[in-house]
Amino acid sequence: MNPSTKQVAVLGSTGSIGTSGLEVIEASNGRLQAIALSAHSQFDRLLAQAIHHRPRWVVATDQEAAERFDWSLLPGQTKLLVGPEALVEVASQAEVDIVLAAIVGSAGLASTWAAIEHKKTIALANKETLVAAGRLVTQLAQEHQVAILPVDSEHSAIFQALQAGSQSEVERIILTASGGPFREFSPQQLKQVTVAEALEHPVWDMGPKITVDSATMMNKALEIIEARWLFDIEAERISVAIHPQSVVHSMVEFVDGSVVAQMSPPDMRLPIQYALYYPERVPGVANRQDWSRGFSLEFQPAEVERFPALKLGYECARAGGSSGAVLNAANEAAVGAFLAGELHFTEIVPACRGVLDTHSFISDPTLDQLLELDQWAREEVSRWVCA
Ligand code: NAD
Ligand code: MG
């Protein structure tokens, strides 16, 4: 094995980000190696990935399903671990250099936390970790001198643009948003949105939860909170611009009025690659802009009145404390209920608002308190669904 090879634990390897991450690893000529893979379901896909990448560990987090699955084709050198605690075990292994945190939802929090405690570099796709526990996670990373490198395309763009100046020279950051598939819909049309329609994103091919989040604009709300913690910037200095082409991934405006943007065709392999190789840039597999053809870029202000989810994002970014964990969990539960046909599309954001407004706010919560509130918020949403 090449000693300079980075050993990557790909947690959530069967998902959209995990699969793109493995493509980046595959194209690395041995500079990156998948030392661990994990999935909650779709074990046939996990097994195929293990046969191809020959990791040291695979983790199957759904214990019951894992026990029913036939693992006999697993390579001899690969050890199977089962259950959610195994994610923590793998993320803490001495041989792991970097964790690609690509699990969806707050289910990704414990392994990222453990990886930080064990001084692993984090390539963070799982924004819910920062939404739910941004202050605690960034404090922990500072304590252990661990870099949290954003994979979310907007935050990767901001991270790159920030290198053009110092923190005190930053005026604001501008998150771009494609606006989702229902940007032009009337309130009446929104009421009729089906699960199939919500799962069709015009630009990005992503997992179901983030695709629905993009359609409700909750994804941008979560990204406001993510940016607040990742870049230690107040909510007032975060703007959102609708940019349907998704070529400018976000921007930083400096005090002199210069706006520095990062551009590339929409392809998550680029921000994943940037995080996995950081601080180096290498030629990669991501699609490139074709400069022999003309193209146009549009920007519109995102009106908070039109997108009530954005208002929730700003409120939670401002309030901090326990609000992010409650919003995040309520949204996860509401999206789950929508996908199960139990909640209308237009009820997702009001359900989150209702749960957020009834929770007993804690200004300086512990991790255990956040985890309890996460559970509470999910139960509140199920009451909302049954009501
Ligand atoms: P996905 O649904 O395609 O994949 C999720 C992965 O997590 C799968 O491997 C799945 O098996 C695993 N998983 C699901 N539930 C789990 C549980 N309870 N415990 C352990 N593992 C579980 O999702 P995705 O689109 O790849 O998104 C992953 C994360 O990256 C999300 O936090 C999302 O917000 C973020 N992200 C995704 C994109 C994108 O383009 N897909 C872009 C930016 C950020
Ligand atoms: Mg994003």
Image: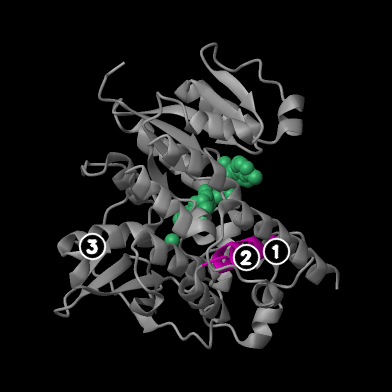
Q: Is residue 329 magenta?
A: yes
On the image, which quarter does residue 208 sit in?
bottom right
What residue sits right under mark 1 in the picture? 377
Residue type at numbered disc 2: Val
What residue sits right under mark 3 in the picture? 161
Where residue 161 appears, as percent x and y from the top left, is 23, 62
The image's colouring method is: one colour
Q: Is residue 148 magenta?
A: no
Label 2, label 1: how far apart the Cα atoms are: 6 Å
Residue type at numbered disc 3: Ala
Density class for disc 3 (Cα within 10 Å; few <14, some 14-19, many ≥20) is many
| Residue 100 falls left or right of residue 281 | right
What residue sits right under mark 2 in the picture? 326
Majority SS type along the magenta span = helix
Density class for disc 2 (Cα within 10 Å; few <14, some 14-19, many ≥20) is many
Query: Quarter of the image containing the N terminus?
Result: top left
Where residue 360 appears, as percent x and y from the top left, is 67, 71
Task: Identify which residue is drawn at 24% across, 69% down.
Answer: 294
**Which stretch appears magenta?**
321-333
Where residue 156 appears, as percent x and y from the top left, is 33, 56
